[in-house]
Image: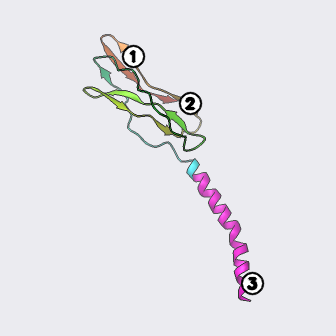
Amino acid sequence: MRRIWCLLALLVSTPLLVVAAFTQERTAQSLPAPTRLSITQSVASQPPPLPREETIPLAPLPSSAWVPGYWAWNNGWQWTAGHWAQPPLGTTIWVPGQWKPQGQNWVWLPGRWQ
């Protein structure tokens, strides 16, 4: 009788374990993009250096998008490394930010999801 109860418990719990595993996997894939500091407006008195070559690691999820690194101005040029991010709902492409000349200065136009 004890064996029958063990087998019955195993048979009943197996579908629940499969559903739980599937739910956890779907939840992990639908997490929002990680919050990172971003430059919204910046002005530099000199042009930025050429972008660095980055080695892009494997994507953590098939839906991930690569956000390339960029030069940030903070009383001197500082490189901000690229990273993988999850696009917000309704978007798929990351349009990188860029430095544009404006008079004698350079103005940062931040990247955006499209």
Q: Is residue 43 above or below residue 36?
A: above
Q: Which quarter of the rendering shows the C terminus?
A: top right
Residue occupying the far left of the picture = 75
| Residue stretch rendered in magenta on the structure | 1-27
Kindly indicate whether the residue at mark 2 contacts the one at mark 1 (C-beta within 8 angstroms). no
Three-letter residue code for mark 2:
Ile
Three-letter residue code for mark 3:
Ile
Q: Residues within 10 Å of mark 3 (few under 14, many from 20)?
A: few
Sequence-first tag of 3 and 2:
3
Quadrant assignment, res 97: top left
Kindly indicate whether the residue at mark 2 contacts the one at mark 3 (C-beta within 8 angstroms). no
Q: CA distance from mark 3 to mark 2?
A: 55 Å
Q: Residues within 10 Å of mark 1 (few under 14, many from 20)?
A: some
51 is within the stretch colored magenta: no
- At x 67%, y 67%, the residue is 16
Q: CA distance from mark 3 to mark 1?
A: 74 Å
Quadrant assignment, res 90: top right
Q: Return the mark for residue 4.
A: 3
Q: Position of residue 15 (x, y in %)?
A: 71, 66
Q: Return the mark for residue 50.
A: none
Residue that carries the numbered disc 1 in the rendered image: 100
Residue occupying the far bottom of the picture = 1
- Left or right: residue 82 versus residue 22 is left
Tag 3's secondary structure? helix
Residue occupying the far top of the picture = 103
Residue that carries the numbered disc 2 in the rendered image: 93
Question: Between residues 78 and 13, which one lies in front from this camera angle?
Answer: 78
